[in-house]
Image (cartoon, coloured by chain):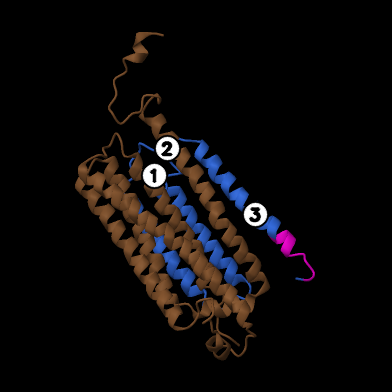
Amino acid sequence: MSDSHTAVEHGPELLHHFVDAEQQRDASTLGMWLFLATEIMFFGGMFCAYLIYRSWYYNEFAAGSRSLDITLGTINTAVLICSSLTVVLAVRAAQMGKRKLLVTLLLLTIVFGFAFLGIKGVEWYQKFEEHHIPGHAFNAADLVQAYPQIHIDQSHEQIYFSLYFAMTGLHALHMIIGVGIFVWLTYYAWRGRYTPKYYTPVEMCGLYWHFVDIVWIYLFPLLYLIDRKPLR
Amino acid sequence: MSEHIMSSKFYYIIWIALLCLTGVTAAVAFVDLGPFNTVVALVIATFKAVLVVLFFMHVKYTSEKLTKVVIVSAIFWLFLLLALSMADYGTRLAR
């Protein structure tokens, strides 16, 4: 063992078992992506259930999709895309060591996160009032009446709404966790922990946030846009 | 991970592209394309997802090559899950 290896100078942010900061960051990135791969399979199970039931009960899925508020859905998609922009700009601010800008952008992301959850809550409340929540009080008679051209089986309609609430619910849970993580990030960003040499947590939490955004990018057309074309 | 810092203008362009695609996908849903409505919606969603992965998640400029292997594997596993399940359920005569 030569002494030159033991006397390497580095800041406290570099753990000693890594050769350099780049290797440490690459290891974190790989680990984060492995976690996201498990998340893809986690949501994948639901997408698979969706695919099977949609192929069986297309009419009920189409009618259920029509009953969702497409305006709020589109706005929410835009809100998430804006939050992804603030996240990527936050990573950039961290890379350049702009602490105030970083804190501002992280706070903006949290605001967008709450905006998304708020709009989602309004949509869920509408479904609650329409008796579209699966269970004893479920009643899709309004859909049967609204779309006489389509044959709708109420129990199959419940499957659409079960998947709707399970998928948007699991997504919203990820959003809530994401907002929590970003509150934690903001606190340490404000304390000045992240520098151009060490901003890995900002980058990794950003990857998580973008992933949750991508899940929504697929949920939006799959749940809201199944069949919107004019009925003949 | 890239040490390379992108210009903020570049991120704004991606952001505007994503917003435009969101508007397009919502508008196209009201046009009758027959069975192609779903295809168009999924193609647009995938295009949006690719933009986010490559540019917002910095995969295009990453120095960590294994990241790409993980992503491709994850998509492949998802494809296996969906394709083999549908091969079963799609070919059942009675349910």
Q: Position of residue A55 (x, y in %)?
A: 66, 70
Question: Is the same chain shared between marks 2 and 3?
Answer: no
The reply to whether discs 2 and 1 touch (Cβ–Cβ < 8 Å) is yes
Instruction: Decide which of A162, B73 is in the foreground and name it.
Output: A162
Parent chain of label 2: A
How far is the residue under mark 2 from the one under mark 1? 8 Å
Please name the residue shown 31% across and 57% down the image: A109
Q: Position of residue A139 (x, y in %)?
A: 54, 84
- Is B49 located above or below residue A165 in the figure? above
- Is B76 located above or below residue A2 in the figure? below
Question: Is the same chain shared between marks 2 and 1?
Answer: yes
Which part of the image, by quadrant, shows the C terminus of chain B? bottom right
Parent chain of label 1: A
Q: Which chain is brown?
A: A
Q: Which mark is residue A204?
A: 1
- The range drawn in magenta is B86-94
Parent chain of label 3: B
Question: Is the same chain shared between marks 1 and 3?
Answer: no
Q: Is residue A108 left or right of residue A218?
A: left
> Does B88 appear in magenta?
yes
Q: Which mark is residue A28?
A: 2
Q: Which chain is blue?
A: B
Question: Residue beneath label 3, please?
Answer: B81
Q: Amino acid at mark 2?
A: Ser
How far is the residue under mark 1 from the one under mark 3? 27 Å
Q: Amino acid at mark 1?
A: Met
